[in-house]
């Protein structure tokens, strides 16, 4: 019975462990076929002959051979004579790797996923060894990246996911992506909680011990959760990093940019747009301008641009001229023009839920359509008040003590006219086909909820602006700080204060959007600190991460 190749591979691994060569171990424990070196196929053939999958004792016999050959896993001493505990989980991990390459069938994705999950879990256990565990970290990172691709591919095949869930012993349904993220997250937490490091986790300007893998493993988890649309499960990863990670700037640029991209996207989805733009701006600054990174810069710039747009800072021609911003002008310039002009008609047409605007579907794919539609509508109304003030507002003379004012009834007329015009058929003339105040625009179509359609008692809803709504909108804009003044409920007028001090009623009543909104959001956040972004080294090496209380993804 020949055991030559198995013993040879074990000897190579044993030598690499003795030399503390983690990269050599990774180069030996190749996981994903096809294999470049034909010796792996010879090894697989030997495993199938000598340790067949249908033999219940094969795995035990493999572990026996590995234990006898990889003597570096035995109890030993370090260079200073201190005892080193045995590393039996490494033996189990090596046996799992050998059985995986023996049995893997790339056409059976679900079986490959289940086997990959077992290999990753056993590797996580080997990683926990206080002194030698770090030697499998590069291997586990590469395995996690393969596992992530497999999990995302399966998540996009619902029929296979349903089969897996039907055979699950867990009462709580978790998607395959969530299960994969939980497996990888155990390795992430092991890196994060490594105590065999210098205080603070930074030595000679670099992460010490297993801390080197914190952001790499976190990025794999985040990739799985983002691509499978399980974004709510990201919060625990960011909280763990906030509690115990060394500062992000000590890590390689690739780790930093990837992590900041996911963190910025998370805050964007959570409607924390000020934090999102800070994080994404740093990610954009740290991404090289070389053409090889154009795709990454474009992706980051997209969400950075939208976050700034929602905060009232619009892209300049200089931004549009950048190569990574190709076609952004055609998409975002009509939106910013509608906001600047208070053009409710144009904005409602572009943000119509029927996605009839030519770029609406693209914004949906980017997952920014609803954020723009919901958050920027407030800015459109603010500009509408400003524009009506310029056209119909009362601006007293130098000797007049009354403040500048705007009759809110004029805003009612303008808003109603623009909303009705937005509901008109696009085939009808728009720009010059309506003479404001002379022609009656069409009545907007009635709306009935599909669940009540056909019921005799169902009354169609037709939205009509009235003075109460316009007054309420104005009050909310004043409360938000983007209109400065007060409302006279009796006169139904907006009065603007501080016009003389500001130099003009417009500057006083309608302050700079970015300055107001960014300052307010910063104050609400308590400064420029962002959850999940560790900028400074924590005293005493940070907090202890208690693994027992770590909440799994999906719970």
Image: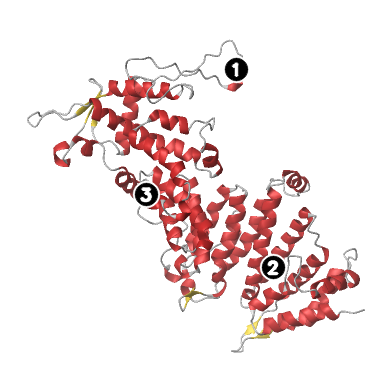
Percent coordinates x, y for residue 288 in the rendering: 47, 64
The residue labelled by disc 3 is 317
* Residue drawn at x 72%, y 44% as measured from the top left: 158
Front-lying residue, 292 or 213: 292
Residue occupying the far left of the picture = 399
Measure the C-alpha gap from mark 1 to mark 3.
48 Å
Q: Secondary structure at mark 1?
A: loop
| 328 lies above or below 340 | below
Q: Secondary structure at mark 3?
A: helix
Q: Are the two marked residues, 3 and 2, in contact with CB atoms closer than 8 angstroms?
A: no
Measure the C-alpha gap from mark 2 to mark 1.
57 Å
Name the quarter where the N terminus is drawn: bottom right
In terms of sequence position, does the residue under pointer 2 or pointer 1 come before the other? Answer: 2
* Residue drawn at x 45%, y 58% as measured from the top left: 284
In terms of sequence position, does the residue under pointer 3 or pointer 2 come before the other? Answer: 2
Colour scheme employed for the rendering of this structure? secondary structure
Mark on residue 206?
Answer: none
Residue occupying the far top of the picture = 456
The residue labelled by disc 2 is 123
| 49 lies above or below 11 | above
């Amino acid at each position: 019975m020949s055991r030559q190749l198995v013993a040879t591979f074990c000897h190579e691994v044993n030598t690499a462990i003795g030399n503390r060569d983690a990269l050599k171990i990774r180069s030996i424990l190749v996981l994903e076929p096809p294999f470049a070196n034909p010796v792996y196929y010879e090894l697989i053939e030997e495993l199938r002959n000598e340790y067949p999958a249908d033999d219940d004792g094969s795995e035990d016999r493999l572990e026996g051979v590995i234990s006898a050959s990889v003597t570096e896993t035995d109890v030993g001493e370090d260079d200073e004579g201190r005892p080193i505990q045995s590393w039996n989980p490494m033996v189990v991990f090596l046996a799992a790797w050998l059985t995986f390459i023996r049995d893997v069938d790339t056409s059976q994705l679900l079986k490959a996923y289940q086997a990959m999950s077992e290999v990753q879990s056993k590797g996580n256990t080997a990683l926990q060894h206080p002194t030698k565990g770090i030697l499998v970290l590069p291997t586990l990172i590469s395995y996690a990246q393969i596992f992530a691709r497999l999990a995302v591919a399966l998540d996009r095949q619902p029929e296979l996911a349903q089969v897996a869930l039907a055979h699950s012993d867990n009462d709580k349904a978790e998607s395959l992506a969530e299960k994969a993220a939980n497996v990888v997250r155990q390795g992430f937490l092991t890196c994060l909680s490594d105590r065999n490091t210098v205080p603070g986790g930074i030595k000679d300007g670099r992460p010490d011990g297993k801390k080197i893998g914190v952001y790499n493993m976190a990025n794999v988890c985040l990739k799985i959760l983002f691509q499978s649309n399980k974004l709510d499960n990201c919060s625990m990863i960011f909280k763990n990093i906030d509690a115990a990670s060394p500062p992000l700037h000590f890590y390689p640029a690739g780790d930093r940019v990837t992590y900041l991209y996911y963190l910025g996207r998370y805050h964007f989805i959570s409607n924390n747009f000020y934090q999102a733009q800070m994080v994404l701006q740093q990610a954009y600054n740290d991404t090289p301008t070389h053409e090889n990174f154009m795709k990454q810069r474009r992706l980051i710039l997209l969400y950075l641009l939208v976050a700034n747009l929602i905060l009232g800072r619009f892209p300049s021609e200089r931004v549009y001229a950048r190569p990574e911003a190709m076609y952004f002008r055609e998409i975002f310039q009509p939106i910013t023009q509608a906001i600047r002009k208070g053009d409710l008609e144009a904005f409602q047409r572009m943000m119509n839920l029927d996605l009839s605007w030519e770029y609406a579907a693209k914004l949906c794919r980017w997952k920014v359509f609803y954020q723009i539609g919901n958050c920027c509508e407030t800015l459109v109304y603010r500009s509408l008040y400003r524009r009506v003030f310029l056209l119909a507002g009362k601006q007293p003379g130098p000797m007049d003590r009354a403040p500048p004012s705007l009759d809110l009834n004029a805003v009612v007329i303008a808003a109603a006219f623009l909303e009705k015009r937005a509901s008109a058929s696009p085939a009808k003339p728009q720009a010059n086909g309506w003479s404001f105040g002379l022609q009656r625009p069409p009545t907007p179509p009635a709306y009935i909820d599909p669940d009540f359609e056909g019921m005799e008692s169902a009354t169609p809803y037709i939205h009509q602006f009235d003075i109460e709504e316009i007054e309420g909108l104005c009050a909310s804009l004043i409360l938000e700080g983007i209109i400065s003044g007060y409302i006279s409920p009796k006169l139904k007028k907006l009065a603007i204060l501080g016009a003389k001090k500001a130099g003009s009623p417009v500057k006083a009543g309608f302050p700079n959007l970015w300055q107001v909104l960014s300052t307010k959001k910063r104050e609400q956040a308590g400064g420029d600190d962002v959850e999940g972004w560790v900028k400074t080294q924590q005293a005493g090496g940070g907090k202890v991460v208690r693994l027992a209380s770590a909440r799994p993804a999906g719970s």
